[in-house]
Structure formats: structure tokens, C-alpha cells
């Protein structure tokens, strides 16, 4: 039976099949959790907290995708496939998709428009990803 991730994999598609790597998975998870923790520091600028939380979310979502044996062709796909990698619904991936758009406007157009509510929603979505990631058994090849 072909999975949804298999359907997105192949030449010219959004994912490339690549065996999971336990060390890479652990590193991405560790990095994501550290950034999420740092994003909670209220003394940092709102933009800095957004950047930390967005990159935490990306690292954690990428860890989930790598656990399943795929590597993304672009950044955005790691959020789009959350229903397939961690069984998370639109209440999570839509927030992350919106934050991806905000991040891109900031990176490419110099317009980073964030507020406390967006950062709080981003951090909540990121915590949901982290929690779901904790429910995965160690990736293949882990001790």
C-alpha cells in the first residue's frame, strides 16, 4: 500500500526518500527543543522570539519527516505533511503555515509583522509538535 508520503516522493516532487538517521533525528529534536525554550524568554525582542520559535518548529517538523524516511525539497512541506508524520490537524499546521508566510515576508521583503498573539500561537503549535514527536519510538538504527 502506497502512503501519502510515498505519493509526494520522487523526481520533481516535494520529498525525496532517504533512510532515517538516528543521529540526525536526535540533533534536530535537541535543536528544536532548545530554540523553543529560548523563545519563551520575555526579555528577547518579539521578532527574536518569533524567529526562535519558527526555527524550533521547522527543526521538530523536519525531525518527524526524517523519522519517516524522507527529506524535503523545500521548507514549507514539513508543515504541510504534519497530518501524515505526526497525525496533527489543521489547528497546528495552519498556524505553522501562516508563520512560514510571515517569516518569508520578513526574510525576502523586510516586513516582519509579528505580535504577541502570533508568537503565542506559534509556540503552542510548536509544543504540540514536540509532544507528538515524543510519542514516536526511536528511529531505525537507534540504540
Image (cartoon, helix red, strand yellow):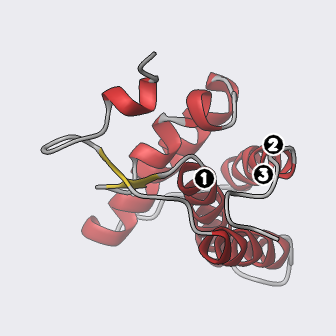
Quick one: label 3 or label 2, which is nearer the N terminus?
Answer: 3
Quick one: label 2 or label 1, which is nearer the N terminus?
Answer: 1
Quick one: label 1 or label 3, which is nearer the N terminus?
Answer: 1
Q: Residue at x 76, y 76 (%)?
A: 30
Relative depth, front residue between 48 and 91: 91
Secondary structure of the residue carrying numbered label 2: helix
Please name the residue that numbered disc 3 is placed on. Answer: 120
Relative depth, front residue between 7 and 37: 7
Query: Looking at the image, is mark 3 or mark 2 nearer the viewer?
Result: 2
Secondary structure of the residue carrying numbered label 1: helix
CA separation in Å, label 2 and label 1 = 10 Å
Q: Residue at x 22, y 41 (%)?
A: 10
Q: Quadrant of residue 132?
A: top right
The percent coordinates of residue 43 (x first, y second) are 84, 84
CA separation in Å, label 3 and label 2 = 19 Å
In the visual, does 42 lie left or right of 32? right
Relative depth, front residue between 66 and 141: 141
The percent coordinates of residue 87 (x first, y second) are 69, 27
Q: Quadrant of residue 135?
A: top right
Please name the residue that numbered disc 1 is placed on. Answer: 61
The residue at the far top in this view is: 1
Please name the residue that numbered disc 2 is placed on. Answer: 132
Amino acid at each position: 500500500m502506497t502512503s501519502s508520503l510515498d505519493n509526494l516522493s520522487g523526481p520533481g516532487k516535494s520529498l525525496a526518500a532517504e533512510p532515517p538517521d538516528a543521529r540526525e533525528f536526535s540533533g534536530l529534536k535537541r535543536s528544536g527543543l532548545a530554540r523553543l525554550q529560548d523563545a519563551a524568554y520575555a526579555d528577547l525582542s518579539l521578532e527574536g522570539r518569533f524567529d526562535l520559535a519558527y526555527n524550533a518548529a521547522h527543526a521538530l517538523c523536519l525531525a518527524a519527516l526524517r523519522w519517516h524516511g524522507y527529506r524535503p525539497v523545500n521548507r514549507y512541506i514539513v508543515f504541510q505533511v504534519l497530518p501524515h508524520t505526526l497525525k496533527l490537524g489543521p489547528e497546528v499546521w495552519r498556524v505553522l503555515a501562516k508563520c512560514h508566510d510571515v517569516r518569508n515576508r520578513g526574510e525576502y521583503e523586510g516586513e516582519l509583522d509579528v505580535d504577541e498573539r502570533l508568537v503565542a500561537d506559534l509556540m503552542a503549535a510548536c509544543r504540540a509538535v514536540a509532544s507528538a514527536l515524543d510519542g514516536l519510538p526511536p528511529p531505525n538504527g537507534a540504540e
